[in-house]
Amino acid sequence: MNTVALDIEVYSNYFLVMLKDASKTAYFEMYPGKELEAPRLRSLLSKLRVVSFNGNHYDMPLLNAALNGESCAKIKAYSDQIILNDKKYWQLNLEAPDVDHIDLIEVAPGLTGLKTYAGRMGARKMQDLPIAPDASISPSQRAQLREYCVNDLDNTLLLFDSLRPQISLRERLSEQYGQDLRSKSDAQIAEAVIKAEVERLTQDKVGKPTTQLGRTFKYKAPAFLARTETVAFVESCEFMVAESGQPKCAALERHVVNGYRMGVGGLHSTESEVSHVIDDDEFLIERDVASYYPSIILVCGLYPPMLGETFLDVYRDIYDRRLAAKASGDKVTADTLKISLNGTFGKLGSKYSCLYSPDLLIQVTLTGQLALLQLIGEVEQAGAKVVSANTDGIVIRGCKRVYADVQAAIASWENATGFVTEEAAYKALHSRDVNSYVAIKPDGQVKVKGAYATTTLSKSPANEICTIAAIEWLRNGTSVEKTIRACKDIRQFCTVRAVRGGAVHRGQEIGKVVRWYRSIAGEVITYKSNGNRVPKSEQATPVMQLPDELPDDIDYVWYVAESASILNDVGIFKLF
């Protein structure tokens, strides 16, 4: 079945539906004097697989209203209720049409807007709605809206291509569980799959979660944790369920143990601007706990109250099948099952989910932190130094003569807790802080995190060439200026940023998501609302549409200095 992107534009006197695949575009309009060709559109939609961005909650219900004969003015009223008044389509008695449809908004990471994703994907053109949503559309403006809609459809297709592996996994899960999971996030899939399996095994419907606002509770440490002062302190903390549904405890959020900061979310070491480069007599290794949160759930026998102990049978079956698939090299199956394992934790703090259990969430995260603190203590007793720790792993530096003792300490911890760790060796670790670092492996490969990670759907670009140049210097000693000047891809010089209320450059509005590079002839970008400077946009030249050739006004001196700043941030000083 052919796959097309779908988008609509809604005005009080104009309604547009546009469909596009890689080579063809079709559009249907409604305005005074022209009715929507509903029978032809229905026939076309019945033969296609449709992808959209936020279509489940906006495009598809409004499209159905149009197919059922509603006027432009009525559809615009529905649209305003959804956008301006935060109404859900079902509250307006709207329904989606019977169409083979995939909504990408939940599948994509981060829950941001299509235009931000476009910037992250390096889309050729980024454009805001060219005509105010409350305008009355003249005949000459219809072509302008069609052109704008085509660009949104191009970016929707680009996003669909970027998400093909995730869509494929969801299609497999949909076949396995007999329900359409293609438009769901990992956490939503976990909830749907586990709920279905529990209901199948118990032959009973899972109920809705109970309201826990204001409820208080305490953490109870499992028996395998040593009875330390820290464990006693954590057990004394009182947690309260906030209005958001999340558990809170101010005392814990301020608690630091030997340089490690605890909290509801996870353990973090507090190092900053530091580099570790080992010599021939040393080792530098990272030990991550495999499937840490799922392992804690199973080892401790934790289950959400709405699902009962049957949850553990379902969850362990998924866990065991994933391990078997991973061991046999069946990556597709392993990745598919991983969605249900890891996505479960994401729903423990959701007050709308049948998996909701704020005390279980605390049991998981605090057990993880306390167990890591115990591992850190045992490793350091063996004669090595833990130089970093974060949520599910630690980085250890030591002399090779104590390596065997460290391994024995880790094995003893694994045996006591039931957890399994995986090791990665490094020859250098350069950290701005615990969440942003560059680790260099013995074979020259790098692992990057946080600010130094490459641009993905989860991370907007910000002068990526500077990070690339800094990493090349750290890895190979290549001059940062040589790396930067050798780059011919304008996207690596760009920053993409959402600007609330819209951005202005040289007196012209350029959009609410802007892309620019640093130019010797550039000028500052400001907020439309107050004229304040958009951060780091001095000497900016917007590139809302990518040029065919590399601009000749790139401020190379600034990019070199920015790379030097990155190296300074990881403890490498006086380079230039």
Image (tube, rainbow, N blue to C red):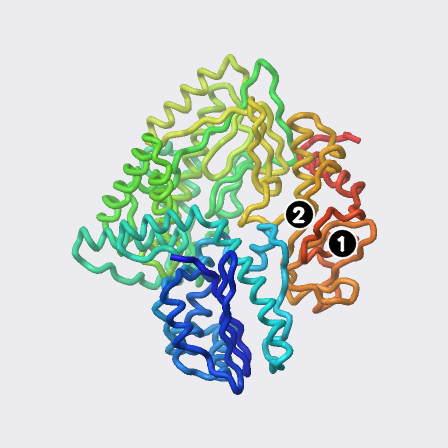
| Residue reaching furthest to the right | 521
Label 1: state its secondary structure.
Answer: strand
Q: Amino acid at mark 2?
A: Arg
Q: Where 342 falls versus 215 (above or below)?
A: above
Side of 266 where 304 appears, left or right: left
Q: Give the residue number, with chain letter if any, for mark 2.
A: 491
Q: Which label sits on residue 475? A: none
Q: Is residue 84 visible?
A: no
* SS state under label 2: helix
Q: Mark 2 against mark 1, which lies toward the viewer?
A: 2
Q: Nearer the viewer, residue 477 or 547?
A: 547
Residue drawn at the location 34% of the way across and 54% of the way down: 357
Query: Measured from the top left, where is residue 538 in percent x and y?
Result: 77, 53
Question: Which percent across, then down, holds residue 375?
Answer: 43, 29
Of the two numbered discs 2 and 1 on the same chain, state the one appearing first in sequence: 2
Residue at 41 percent across and 57 percent down: it is 2
Query: Residue sitting at 47 percent across and 84 percent down?
Result: 71
Along the viewing direction, whichever of 122 and 86 lies nearer the viewer: 122
* Residue at image mark 1: 540
Vertical position of residue 405 compared to residue 69: above or below: above
